[in-house]
């Protein structure tokens, strides 16, 4: 197999893996939801399924970005393809930050509440 064809194949497999991670994680969260609902109150079950889906989306986005980087840098490193990659990465970074804000209630660069309340030694 030719070198560039192999790299293109790895980029495509990265896309497939990213989508598979998202689908599997969402399905897993939805399958767990009724069980959590029967064991705990509705707000706990909802928060748990929401966090599961959010974490899954974050992981899937990271894999998709990696696949785009592999494909763009190794296969067709033209100025136009790098510009498109930069736009895709910027959009996905914004989505990741938004998901972290939704899940944790803070921006990624802000310290977590436990870190802030800990006394310095």
Image (cartoon, grey):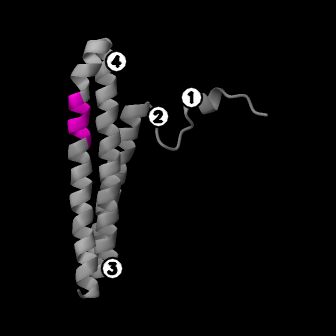
Residue bearing mark 1: 113
Residue 77 visible, this angle: no
**Label drawn at residue 37:** none
Distance from disc 2 to disc 3, alpha carbons, whole Å, reads 35 Å
Label 4: which secondary element: helix
Q: How far from the left and from the top, in percent, is residue 83?
A: 30, 71
What percent of the width, then of the height, locates residue 52? 32, 34
- What secondary structure is marked by label 3? helix
Mark 1: which secondary structure?
Answer: helix
Magenta portion: prevailing SS class: helix
Report which residue position mark 4 lands on: 44
Q: Is residue 96 left or right of residue 75?
A: right
Where is the C terminus found, in terms of image quarters? top right
Mark 3 vs mark 4: which is more N-terminal?
Answer: 4
Tell me the magenta residue range.
25-31
Q: Nearer the observer, disc 3 or disc 4? A: 4
Circle 2: element type: loop
Q: Position of residue 43 (x, y in %)?
A: 31, 16
The residue that disc 3 covers is 74
Magenta segment includes 48: no
Closer to the chain start, of discs 1 and 2, is 2
């Amino acid at each position: 197999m030719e070198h560039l064809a192999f790299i293109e194949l790895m980029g495509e497999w990265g896309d497939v893996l990213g989508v598979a991670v998202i689908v599997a994680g969402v399905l897993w969260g939805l399958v767990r939801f009724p069980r959590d609902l029967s064991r705990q109150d509705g707000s706990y079950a909802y928060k748990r399924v929401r966090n599961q889906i959010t974490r899954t989306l974050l992981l899937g986005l990271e894999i998709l970005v990696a696949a785009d980087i592999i494909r763009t840098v190794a296969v067709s490193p033209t100025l136009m393809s790098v510009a498109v990659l930069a736009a895709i990465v910027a959009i996905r970074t914004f989505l990741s930050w938004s998901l972290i804000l939704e899940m944790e209630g803070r921006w990624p660069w802000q310290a977590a509440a436990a870190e802030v309340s800990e006394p310095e030694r």
